[in-house]
Image (cartoon, rainbow, N blue to C red):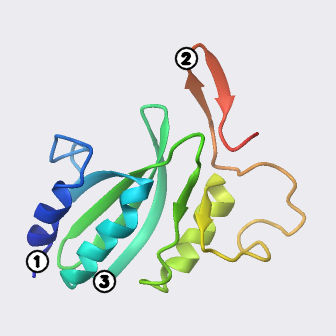
Amino acid sequence: MTIFTAWNELKKLSLADRDELLPGFNEKQVLLTSNQLIEAVKILLANNIFHLSTITGVYQENSLQLLYHFWKGEGITLRVEIDEQDNQVDSLTEWIPGALFYEREITEMFGVKINGLNMSNKMFLPDNWEGDAPMRRAIRVGNDEQQQGHK
């Protein structure tokens, strides 16, 4: 099985009509909702693509996306839009135990709730950190600015 085979299956889930979501990004990508993440990961695993390189957070067109970077001879990225109101995604640790480190970072730095992730203490921020998630930024919602991660 190859990245190309998995990518063809994943494109059926993708929210984007374009094959390339980031110009110059030298890997295949699909854009997904947070509810589609586990299904997409299962497709990758069924195609023997197990290596999760990292998870990064980016702001794209005033929304937060998590980029799940997988690798098997070449890259494939699952771009997951995080719903502003829901602000959560399921943990991959049941299928990819090594995702724990990246998921903890995303939770602390971006304030995204990872369902199934047990965090009893901080890993990256000081234990006495009282501020908001440091990488979470204000986004424009209509005519108002709203700080994501704040209720």
Which of these two is toward me, 43 or 4?
43
For residue 58, above or below residue 151: below
Question: How far, Cα to Cα, is label 1 from label 2?
Answer: 42 Å
Q: Which quarter shows the C terminus?
A: top right
Kind of residue indicated by mark 3: Phe
- Pick whichever of labels 3 and 2 is earlier in the sequence: 3
Residue 149 % position (x, y):
69, 44
Report whether 106 appears left or right of 7.
right
Secondary element type, mark 3? loop
- Pick whichever of labels 1 and 3 is earlier in the sequence: 1
Residue identified by numbered label 1: 2
Secondary element type, mark 1? loop
Question: How far, Cα to Cα, is label 3 from label 2?
Answer: 40 Å
Residue 104 % position (x, y):
62, 70
Residue identified by numbered label 3: 50
Residue 142's label in the rendered image is 2
Residue 34 % position (x, y):
44, 55
* Residue visible at 65% across and 57% down in the picture: 109
For residue 13, above or below residue 54: above
